Image (cartoon, coloured by chain):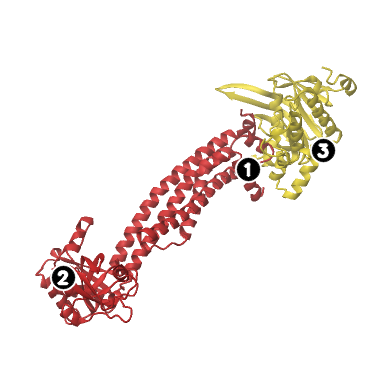
Chain colours: A yellow, B red
Amino acid sequence: MLIETKGLKKIYSIDGSETPAVNGINLEIKEGEFVAIIGPSGSGKSTLLQILGCLDRPTGGEYFFDGKEIEKYSDDELAHLRNKKFGFVFQSFNLLGRLSVLENVELPLIYAGIPELKRREMAVKVIGSVGLSDRVDFETMRLSGGQKQRVAIARALVNEPRIIFADEPTGNLDSKSGEIILEFFEKLHEDGHTIVLVTHETYLAESAERIIYLKDGLIEREEIVNHKSFRENKFSK
Amino acid sequence: MKFRDNLKMSYSGLTTHMSRSVLTILGIVIGITAIIIVMSLGQSAQNLIVGEIQSMGPETIVVLPGKQPKGLSDVGGSIFGDSLKERDFKDLSKKENVPDAVNVGPVVFSQINSSYGSETYDTMILGVSPSMFKTFGLEVNPPGTLFGSNDVNEKSSVVILGNKAQTELFGNSDSIGEKIKIKGKNFKVIGVLIKKGQSSFVNFDDHIIAPYTTVQDLSGLKYFNRIAVTAKSVEAIPSVIKDIELVLRTNHKIDDPKNDDFYIQTQEDLVKSISSITDILTIFLGSVAAISLVVGGIGIMNIMFVSVTERTREIGLRKALGATNKNILVQFLTEAVILTVTGGVIGIIFGTGLTALTVVVLNKFAGINFSFSFPIDGALLGLFVSSAVGFIFGIFPARKASLKSPIEALRYE
C-alpha cells in the first residue's frame, strides 16, 4: 500500500474553539491508482490532500507513506519526501512568473542537488512531454492558463515522483483547457502514475478509477467508476 | 543544493525588483564611501605629518618659548614668546652644560617683503646658525655657498634663497652675487637651495635664509623662536632634556618646574601626539560614517522583511517543491549579503575615486604634498563590514522566511 491513514484528524483551534477539518479518516491508496476526492466546499478535501502531501501535519491519527509513519519525520525529512516522492499541481498554478518555463520546471531538481546539465536535459524532456517544447525559454507569466497548468504538471513530473497530488487543477481554466489537462492526468495514469485528485466537480472526479466522497471531514462513501458511461458524459455540460 | 544555484536564485530574486534593490543599497554605498575616504585621507595626512617630523631626525630636540600649549589658545606663546635669549643659546652650546648634545642651533623667523628690481616677494626669512644646515639637511646648488660662523658674528647681509624665492625674484636668471632688498637694506645672494619640498613643517623652498644675528637685527628681535638641540643618540635624549631644563631654569631663575617659560619637544613626542590626534579624528569620523552603515543596514532589513512578506507564496511553493528551511534561510540571507556587498564594492570604488580626486586637488591647488595609494586595508574592511551588515540585518528576515509553514505560506493571499 502506498498510502494508508488510520483515524486521521486535523482540528483547527481558533480563539479557543475547535473546528475539525478532517475528523478521523481511514484511507488506503494503492500504487498506480487514480483516486478522486470529492466533496462540497468545507468538506475537508483540500486539508486531507495537504496532509497526504506532507504540506501540513495532522493533529491526530496515523499516516503511513510506503509503510513508514510520517509523524516521526522532521521538517527536513518531509521536505526531502516532497522533493523526491511527490508532485503537486495546484489550482492557481503557483509558478514563479518572472522565471522561464525551463527554470520553473527545474526548481525541484535544484533542491534535489542535480547538476545543471543533467537538470536541463531532464526538464527539457518533460516540457516536451506536455507539448511546450516551443515555450522552453518563455517567462511563464506570458503563457495562457492552460499552458501554465501544463508547466505545473511538467514541474510535478520532473522528479519522477511516486504520487501526484492535484488540487482543483482545472478550477482556473476554461472548459477546453480543462479537458486538455484532464486528458494529461488520464494519460499519466495509463503510464502507471499514482494520482490523487481533489475536486468538487463530479464529472472531473469520474475520470478517476475510484471516487471518495467527503462530507464534514469524514468519508461519506466510496465508488468505483464505470469508465464507459463516464466517457460518454464527459464535458457534456 | 549547490551554492552556485543559490547565488543564481538570489540574484534572480533581486533583479526582479531592480530599482528597489538599487535604492536599498544606497545607504551602504554612502557609508562605505565615507569610511574609505576618511580612512585613506586620515592615513595620508598622518604619513605626511609624521614624515615631516621625522625628516629632522629622531635625535633632534626642539626648545620652544612659553608654556607647553594645552590647547589651541596656548599656541601663541610658542610663536610670540621671548624667553629664549642669546645667553641661553650660548650656555646650551657649552659642552660642559649639555655633554650629550652634538649640535645646538637657534632659529628666528620673521615675515618680510623682499624685492629685486621691480619683482617683489612676500615670504618668511629664517635666521639660523651654520650648524642648522645639517639639522635641516639644507644644501645649495653650486657655485653658491652656505654662510659660516663669521657671517653670524658679523651679522653679514647675506641670504640663501629657497627655490621658489629664487624663481619669484629672478625668474630663470642667475641670482648668485646679486643684491635683493629687504626692509630697505641690501642683501647679497650667496646661494640657492637645492629643491627640497616640505619638511619639518617648513617649506624651505618658499623662504629666504640668513644668519640668525642678521635676522634678529633686521627684525629688532632679541630672542629666538626655537633652539634646536641634537642629541648624540636617541638613547641620550632623556639626559639631554634634563641638562637643557637645568641650564634654562638656572638662567631664567625658575625654581618650580610649573613656572617654566619654555618647553621641550622631542620628535617622538610630536609623532605620538600627532598620530594620536589623527587616529582619534579618523576613528571619530569613521564612527560617524559607520552610523550611516547602521542606517543602511536597517533599510536592508526593512526591505527584506517586505520582500519576505511579499514572497510568502513563493516561499510556500519552494517548500512544497522540496526546499528545506535551511535552503530558504540561505537564499534570503544570500540576497541580503549580495545587496550589501554590491553596495560595499560600489562604495569602495566611489571612495577610492573621491580620495584620488581629493589628493589631486590638494596637491594641485593647496600645494600639500599628499600621497595617494589604494587603501587595501580600507577596501578589505569595507568588504568585511558590508558583508557583516548584510549578514546581521539579513538574518532576521531570512529566518522569518525559513520558518514559514509550507501550507500557510501557500494559502497566503
Q: Nearer the viewer, residue B128 or B101?
A: B128
Mark 2 secondary-structure assignment:
helix
* Residue that protrudes farthest toward the left in the picture: B253
| Residue A131 image-quadrant placement | top right
Horizontal placement of B351 versus B278: left or right?
right
The answer to whether B111 is drawn above or below residue A181 in the figure is below
> Residue B218 has which mark?
2
Horizontal placement of A42 versus A129: left or right?
left
Q: How crowded is mark 1: few (under 14 residues within 10 Å), some or many (20 or more)?
A: some
> Residue B12 has which mark?
1
Residue corresponding to mark 3 = A129
* Residue that protrudes farthest toward the front in the picture: B118
Mark 3 secondary-structure assignment:
helix
Image depth: mark 2 or mark 1 in front: 2
Residue B130 drawn at (x, y percent):
23, 79
Dot 2 and dot 3 residues touching (CB under 8 Å)? no
The lab-note entry on whether marks 3 and 1 share a chain reads no
Residue B75 drawn at (x, y percent):
21, 59
Tell me the residue at 24%/68% (across/down): B115
Horizontal placement of B388 versus A76: left or right?
left
| Label 2: chain letter | B
Count of labels shown?
3
